[in-house]
Image (cartoon, coloured by chain):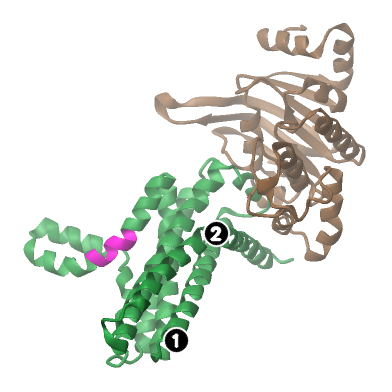
Amino acid sequence: MSKAAGKASAVRVIAKSVLVEAVRRKEIYVIILLCCALIGVVMTLDFFGLDGLVKFYREVALKLMGVSTAIAVVLLATRQLPREFEFRTIYPLLARPVGRLTFLIGKGLGVCAAAAFCFGLFMILYVAGILSLGGDLAWGLFVQHIYLQMLLMMLLTSACFLLSLLFNYDAALVMGLLLYSASGILSSTSLFLYDLTTDIGRLLLIALNYLLPQLVLFDLSEKVLHSELWGPVSSATLATLTVYALAYTLVFTGISYRLFRRRPL
Amino acid sequence: MKKMIEVENLTVSYGRGSQRHVAVEGVSFTVGEGECVGFIGANGAGKSTTLKTLMGFTYADSGAARVCGHPAGAPEGRRSIGYLPEVALYYPFMKAKELLELYGTLGGMKKEAFKRRIPEVLALVGLAGHEGELLRTFSKGMQQRLGIAQALITEPELLVLDEVSSGLDPLGRYDLRCILEGLTKAGRTIFFSSHELSEVESLCDRVILIDEGKILREVTREELHTIGRERSLESFFISEVRAGGKGNE
């Protein structure tokens, strides 16, 4: 087996082990069930009329499904490395001819695969809900939304890995959730705050703006909701967002690798 | 004789500044091909740190360690090692067969080889028939047996076993001794740490005594038998540790 094929095979089996964990543990199903219960309640509301209900369903379902998948990703990603250290499962793994970067990439891809599994289930439920309500779906925008959400999950995974190497599991989990929730708030308030603050404050805002990934950029749910007004996003925008997500993921993974490369186990 | 492990003047410490603790200091020894060498010492003597350094999990402050002709921790060297960590748990959501497939693939095994090898190692460690069970249902002893199975899955040239009999009942220890004897007869090199002096006496060609991070003494099988005729190994071990390796000089 060539060196590259050996590495690819190692990445694949490590990723598969993470996916098996995600599928066999109950968290994802609990998150999906809770989310479905909430959406089920929404579907029983009848004070909007049918048109309003479809729109309300779209809005609530897309937001809830996005947030739920992000929570599942943060939960799964932040515990990968601390659990490996805590239960010492990392020893027999790294006792093989497996590099630490291969290990990190395998774990990251596994979390992304688990996110795809979770989000995929959500999207099937979403489409079934829309069709059962007699609503129509703007497929172009919808597929773009799924693609951008997957990019977001990849970026979030790499950020959570970095956090779990910098802090303990509990702190990394909280910070991962904060990163996800604060990104939207920061994006919407930074322009407003920029006008109100002085030089140092402005510098800090600019630094934060570049330091933290703008996760809201990957959320097309508003456009999917008002698909009668919006067409699909241009391919140039999609390409830019892909590069943006890849750049942050590479930087976060690079820093994680630097921290993990010579860490005594 | 080809040297499978070469350790030269190895020093390893943890922490920094006033928190710095030297776990291993100036340790040197070799393990030749086909040898079975026991590494014994009290808790905190530096056994696990030495083994972890050989595997590339911790790093030496000074000195050098080579495994199978490669620097400690190099992937080329790790290809030839089967390692059993001290008190490791295995993924509770996996089945025994899946775990061995995972480690086998990472060790470079081909998929076709699993069909033969997995039932073989599971039978060897007394876990035949358990391949389809989730590891969360395994007892501590079964986990340790599985640990030995994962170390053996790729048929490595060198076995590095940390506290090999930990968690095993008397029957499990007897089975383990039989496995290790079989492997020694088959020409495998074994380097293991243990608290079990009887295990060491019956299996090893040589024993290395370590205490407070320093090697106290190396004892050959012949010397061990001579000592065993005069007094118990336990009293020998205690007197050596108390005398700082000069107990018999």
Secondary structure character of the magenta stretch overall: helix
Mark 2 vs mark 1: in front: 1
Q: Chain of mark 1?
A: A
Q: CA distance from mark 2 to mark 1?
A: 38 Å
**Amino acid, disc 1:** Ser
Judge by depth and name the residue closer to the eye, A259 or A77.
A77
Q: From the viewer's perspective, is A25 left or right of A78?
A: right
Q: Which residue matches tag 1?
A: A132
Q: Which residue matches tag 2?
A: A107
Rendered shade, chain A: green
Judge by depth and name the residue closer to the eye, B125 or B81.
B125
Residue A118 among those drawn in magenta? no
Q: Judge the density around disc 2: few (<14), some (14-19), many (≥20) Cα neighbours within 10 Å.
A: many
Q: From the viewer's perspective, is A67 left or right of A208?
A: right
Magenta segment: A179-185
Rendered shade, chain B: brown
